[in-house]
Image (cartoon, coloured by chain):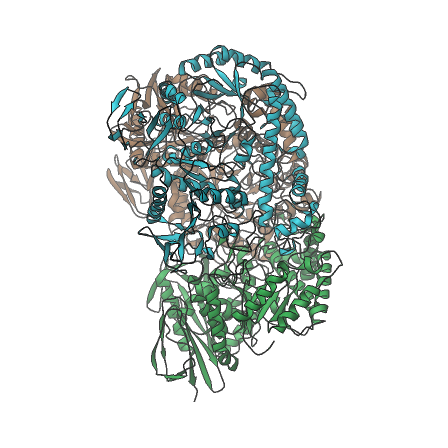
Chain colours: A green, B cyan, C brown
């Protein structure tokens, strides 16, 4: 990839005739599209009959686009095996949790673990990579498309056998598995790995270990498929490889990106839920830290399918979406899709051009993005996102645990998004980091809603604390073992031991009339909670009312040069939000978190670091305008004029780029 | 059929003993029932063992009823094949979208496309027709019963093969199908018709063309079955043939009635939703224009099954239901059912007599209907429903398109019913007409909510306009091709070309804050919309706020002696209703629509034409009373007294019959 | 069993190691647990491999507990057959209504009617009973666990065959079945029992008789299994046998307990729905009248599984739950469970000890129960629950009828619970009695919501009335035959005949604007209703408005020395509650029902009878405190002091035991 900002779109030339393609290329140039993503569903074009490969079409398109200054992210076409793969072979297809076998049509209809699928996927990818891997237009690769966005764990016979192999590998002996899962319960006990069922139809819930392990197995297998595909491509191409993922899919993103070259995501968050848009940038930046990520798909106006549709963005919003992404570390900002589909099931989806070649309702906004891209490219290329001082751990593995055990209806994704929004609103620059990420550079680490905390994570966090960090743990964190069972030594196992906390009870606190007080705020408490012994040396938050009145729900424990803060419950409602923000504020102040502004709600500051100077991107996301206090004189990069210290006001969907010299 | 008004009931003598039957006949005579419908579920009576036919029971009952002055509409018994048909033959049974195979029990459990079903259905119908076809008591036939009321498209193996044949017939080559459906998308591409799947289990949505064509295939096949059955009956009987259908079922009513002799429907609309009752008469009148239709089933008080029940009608409502039906063109008004079931799954359903032979809560209302029938029969027989000047096109094909593509949750049936209610409330006499109906006699044609508009329809409507008609098109009309794809020439394809409209964008306008203004009313705009270029020569409605502020949502285009009005969005809320009514008012006035009164909401006027005079049936449907202005002196047909011009008031559930002499 | 009050817990020593077990026993002694229930899921422990039995573990545990003063209720382990039973044998598994076959995991996954299941269940139970049946520690047995709590009617092939046998036994000839079920309807007609389907997938509802009979078949078969198991145990043990059931499960409790020795139930009602807790004691006392029942499972604080959780009890509530149970006739009060599970799917469930051995949030409440148990044991052992004078019939068979025919969404369980709550609130001591219970000792009998009333029941109730009783019948009672068809002689068949009522109509009265007046209260009327002729001699409640204005909805008919009161509709809302309570009050006063107090809402009085004295347990259940008027001087059994006549006040969750001498 070149050193530039990419502005792109998903493109499906295989669906259109020559006249349309020519028109598309001209239009792309007018708009300023400098990259397209192609080929992710084109298996039947690439291999129309078994073993008859035809890559010429794409080779030619890639070259032609390149001649017009448009580069290509090429995709492997594996989400949609052709009819010759599926016809007459139900055993190759995805089987859902109720036992329904998928037929041809839609996508992700094949079992990605079936040996024949893997064999054919390898072949088509090899042929494709060999043909286009060294074309100058190909600047990157995308493996497949949105793994596990429509499906989750396959229940086919092939998966059953591989599940048994995976278990053998994990547990070595069936006795180990029986012990780990506690299978003496309900006479589940297995005499061999072959006897372990898949979590299919049952009168009531399956064993939590079975349900969670089957998810981990499935997430591992799809990542393994991704690895295989990447290896094949690397044999023929030097272009970096990614996958377009999301926290909404049934994958372990940390594992998935481990062997890929750069990270990218798809997002279709509604404009009035912009924190759900921003969270992606703050997380994806950290899957491949130091490398730019891509927004691989977002709608120029609205997402839609035959059955549903989002609300079109208000004018101006697309521009600030792009501004925020680039400022927070994106190198590419791409639409799904360039030209509206004429067939299939996503014809209603928003696009840059309509199926009849006219500008869509989003078109003017796309032009605004291109103007923005040109305006900020020099600033972005000269700087890098500032290192955050506060990190929140995000875990797809924890998502799987909570899918098995949602209590009432908890989801890791939405819980963390809510938590993230509070930090965002406080004007604190932040990272979301995967579980295995380095903790270097952080002053405050938050670990909420992670049912199972690995021993390795606890050790690193303990070290982080000893070296002076502040670790805020909970709520809902640490109460489960690696095997998705309950600890038998302490409520929170190893975590409880190293923190020095003393957990008296754990129970669901919702609707029990519990009130907690901390930082001069009283708030209702809820969620599955840990109640701590009330010790004058450690107590920070006291339960004032409820079953555990007089006990503690927040405690603080010194360890080395730092401290561990245990948050046992979730404070609820407006008072709860206030309490949490005061807690975060207290510990951020204490930890000397300086990357923070007084930006008003709905507006964000994205700080970047240059050589001897820093940059603030100040961006109004909510359409209500906003303001922030500039701490010192800066330079407005758009007008090249000085701006005084003090209040900087922004209009609706306005963004400003302010440079501050560092002394 | 004789020249009289029929007042009837569904009757199941095969379920009762001789004593009860004798009691029933006496009671029917007392009540005034002059026709019964029989036999639609009696296959196991008629052919208790395979090839052992026994029609004697029905022959005898028909004759006996006839002797008592009660005529018969005889049914073919094909909705419920006997146990000898189903036992041990799952391959003959209906298979639902999830792959579940039906077992014996309930009804419509057989696949109506299975060759063996067709063979046995032909045999039983032939035997039945031969035996009773020339009996004097048999004045009509009903094929089967409520086709596709419980089921929709069968997914069995037989259907799969016939689906392939149907596709071959439609597309001739698989290449044509691939092109038409755009199957290069998502590698759906088929190499032979055999490879085309049924739209069964898939991870996400099927191709829209596949889903819609499978519905059209299913609707065509059931009509073909109806045709086959009718042909057999015609070999033995001169009595006219119908089917009791509904806009709620998965059939194409226009196609279904094409080869039948008269039209009939079943309705169980609640009294407080009387427009949903009336719409049937205004539509069914036009399936066989010029012939009377039948209300083949309606409840004397309330519908019910084991699992649910409607609310009993208020006293007086049944009478005005009958009055409205007869006035709007019905020749028959029949109850389901005469005597409450003692067994099965519809025991709770309202009836004329209870299972223990007593009058039910609806009984007095049935007597009122009989009195009405006697009172109005001379007037009805001497007149015919007046030709409406405004027509709204209703399309079951469009219902199928919207089932495939409901956007959020749109249904053709409910959208058109809402639209119809507005016209009804305006006091305009109206027709609902099927797509292929002649446009002769109309001044205003409305075509809302028809995703795909056939070329043939467009040509006829264009001709209608050229000859002076006003055609109001939209919202949601014309954006899809015959193959359920998106146009690639213009947003609305051929429609856009002939109308002269210039569609800029199409997008879902709900929740975007869009406001439109026309006819001095501003209203919120919603629904998937077409936005038009704002041209001073054509604009009628301007978008004042929202993403497309300054553009048009209503335009008017002169063509020949008439005009095409394009309605791009659905105005919402009370203001939206007002805007639509002003639009309709404006164009009805302009087109000189004269069959219109100032009748108050909840009351209707049904105009009929006699020789040198006209008749108004004025009927209060909502139980609140109402009024209408009589334009000149008339004659009250019930009292044979003059009524002055001016306000005519009606009491709760009152009806009046006013004759006006024409000069 | 000894003469004492049991305070127990479910215990799973097979899941824990020796150290934990030792700790458990010590803790149980500290807490005061004097009985444990064990083994109900331990089949794989007891018979780890086919035919290899190992009972030694339990023998040893039982003896060891006994040595520490803890007795055992031993369970048969049949709800969870081991993997050797299920592996490779889908034909042995439970099949749901959609045809899904269960796999190993969860519980109740086997078909309990499969001959091989019965064979293996007999073997394991015999081995178990032989080994532990005469141990001194075993004081009782529990068959299986919560029959049909997760499943209802199995649809497997084995069940199909046994269903046919059951039908042959019931109907003798297929012609009898056809006639009884009215199968001529919809051509359901069967030529042999083999042709009768199970009520599986169908396009619409099955015949009501088929659906109901399949439920009765299923309920009979599970009771038959229980009988078989009990017989085996009796060969080796003299300890009495029970099953832990509930009105929430798909069983006929009356039939189930017929051949068992004592009755027990499980309940997890929320504290703010305490009538749903109390109803169990008032019903279970009467399954084995004169014998104490057991609360076999209730939570020490809250119920939970991976997917959901209840709200923890407020402190103090558990104590009054135990007080109410013991006072109303319980001999045992047991928790589920002693030690929190570490694995499986119920880890989150409330327990006495946590998985890590600490007291839980419920622990202090358990100690309060133990204190209570000690305090009241002498009083309880010296007295018995007073004979109620008012009885309400509860029928699981009627539950099945309403499951087949829920009208809109009626359930026998919730209807009766609501009705019960009204009686409870009125301070009337009451029994819920099964259908075949003796009516001796009652003055007022209520029979609401029983669709089918057996001839035998009617005869007994008639006799009860003739001898002076007051029988209040309805609403919704008596309108169906034994075969779940509708009567053909009178609306209410035999009931109507003996009552002398004259039913004019039956129809669903909801939303018809019907108002009824009786006992000086006017209230809206709803529910499927019987309308009676208005006869001055019999009318008690008149319909003032609606379709049947002027007719009666309550009538009273003298019969012998007593009276039958027919309640045709359900009075609704607050006024309806008032009307029902005045009706009950009126007839209780008339019938001289004396076991009644003026206790305030939320507090109950449980009367018990001693030798020459009576006892009142006055218990505040709702946490708001309350009061009752003492009719005369009494003795406070807790303080051994006199209490004066007049108002006795109770604090939040307080209970008082007052003794009154009888003269």
Q: Tell me the quarter of the picture where residue C636 sits.
A: top left
Between A492 and B88, the one nearer to me in the picture: B88
Q: Is residue A83 left or right of residue B477?
A: right
Q: Is residue C174 left or right of residue C587?
A: right
Q: Is residue A483 above or below residue C570?
A: below
Q: Is residue B166 above or below residue B297?
A: below
Residue A23 makes an appearance in the image: yes
- Looking at the rendered structure, the number of numbered marks drawn on it comes to 0
- Relative image position of residue B3 (x, y in whole percent): 45, 18
Q: Which residue is rendered at x = 62% and y = 28% of the image?
A: B228
Q: Is residue A52 left or right of residue C326?
A: right
Between B262 and C636, the one nearer to me in the picture: B262
Q: Is residue A62 above or below residue C218?
A: below
- Relative image position of residue B465 (x, y in whole percent): 45, 44
Q: Which residue is rendered at x = 54% and y = 33% of the image?
A: C204
- Relative image position of residue B557 (x, y in whole percent): 42, 51
- Quarter occupied by the C terminus of chain B: top left
């Amino acid at each position: 990839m070149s050193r530039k900002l990419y502005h792109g779109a998903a493109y499906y030339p295989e669906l259109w005739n020559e006249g349309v393609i020519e028109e598309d290329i001209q239009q792309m140039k007018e708009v300023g599209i400098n990259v397209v993503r192609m080929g992710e569903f084109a298996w039947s074009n690439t291999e129309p009959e078994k073993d008859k490969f035809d890559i010429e079409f794409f080779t030619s398109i890639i070259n032609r686009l390149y001649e017009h200054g448009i580069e290509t992210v090429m995709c492997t076409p594996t989400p949609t095996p052709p009819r010759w793969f599926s016809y007459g072979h139900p055993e190759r297809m995805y089987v859902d949790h109720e036992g329904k076998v998928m037929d041809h049509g839609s996508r992700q209809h094949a079992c990605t673990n079936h040996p024949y699928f893997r064999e054919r996927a390898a072949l088509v990818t090899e042929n494709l990579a060999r043909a286009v891997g060294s074309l100058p237009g190909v600047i990157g690769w995308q493996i497949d498309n949105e793994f596990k966005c429509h499906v989750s764990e396959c229940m086919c016979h092939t998966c059953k056998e591989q599940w048994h192999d995976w278990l053998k590998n994990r547990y070595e002996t069936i006795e180990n598995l029986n012990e780990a899962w506690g299978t003496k319960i309900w006479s589940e006990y297995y005499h061999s790995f072959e006897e372990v069922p898949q979590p299919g139809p049952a009168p009531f819930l399956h064993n939590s270990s079975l349900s969670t392990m089957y998810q981990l197995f499935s997430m591992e297998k799809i990542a393994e498929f991704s690895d295989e595909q990447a290896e094949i491509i690397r044999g023929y191409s030097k272009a970096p490889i990614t996958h377009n993922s999301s926290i909404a899919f049934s994958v372990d993103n940390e594992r998935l990106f481990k062997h890929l070259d750069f990270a990218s995501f798809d997002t279709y968050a509604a404009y009035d839920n912009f924190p759900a848009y921003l969270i992606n940038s703050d997380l994806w930046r950290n899957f491949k830290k130091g490398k730019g990520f891509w927004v691989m798909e977002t709608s120029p106006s609205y997402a839609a399918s035959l059955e549903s549709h989002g609300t079109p963005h208000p004018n101006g919003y697309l521009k600030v979406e792009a501004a925020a992404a680039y400022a927070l570390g994106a190198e590419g900002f791409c639409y799904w899709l360039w030209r509206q589909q004429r067939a299939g099931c996503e014809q209603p989806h928003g696009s840059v051009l309509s199926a009849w070649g006219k500008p869509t309702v989003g078109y003017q906004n796309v032009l605004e993005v291109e103007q923005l891209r040109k305006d900020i490219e020099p600033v972005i290329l000269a700087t890098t996102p500032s290192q955050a001082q506060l990190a929140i751990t995000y875990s797809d593995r924890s998502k799987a645990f909570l899918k098995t055990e949602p209590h009432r209806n908890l989801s890791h994704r939405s819980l963390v998004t809510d938590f993230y929004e509070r930090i965002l609103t406080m004007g604190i620059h932040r990272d979301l980091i995967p579980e295995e990420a380095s903790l270097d550079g952080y002053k405050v680490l938050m670990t909420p809603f992670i049912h199972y905390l690995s021993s390795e994570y606890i050790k690193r966090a303990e070290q982080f604390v000893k070296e002076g960090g502040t670790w805020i743990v909970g709520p809902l964190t640490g109460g489960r073992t690696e095997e998705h069972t309950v600890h038998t030594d302490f409520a929170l196992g190893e975590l409880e031991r190293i923190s020095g906390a003393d957990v008296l009870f754990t129970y669901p606190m919702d609707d029990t009339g519990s009130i907690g007080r901390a930082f001069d705020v009283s708030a209702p408490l809820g969620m599955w909670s840990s109640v701590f012994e009330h010790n004058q040396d450690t107590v920070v938050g006291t339960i004032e009312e409820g079953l555990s009145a007089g006990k503690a729900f927040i405690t603080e424990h010194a360890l080395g040069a730092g401290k561990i803060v245990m948050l046992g419950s979730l404070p609820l409602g407006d008072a709860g939000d206030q309490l949490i923000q005061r807690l975060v504020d207290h510990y951020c102040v204490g930890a000397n978190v300086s990357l923070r502004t007084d930006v008003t709600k709905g507006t964000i500051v994205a700080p970047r670091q240059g050589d001897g100077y820093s940059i603030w991107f100040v961006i109004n996301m909510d359409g209500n305008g906003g303001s922030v206090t500039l701490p010192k004189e800066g330079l407005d990069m758009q007008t090249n004029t000085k701006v005084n210290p003090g209040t900087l006001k922004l209009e609706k969907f306005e963004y400003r780029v302010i440079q501050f010299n560092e002394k």
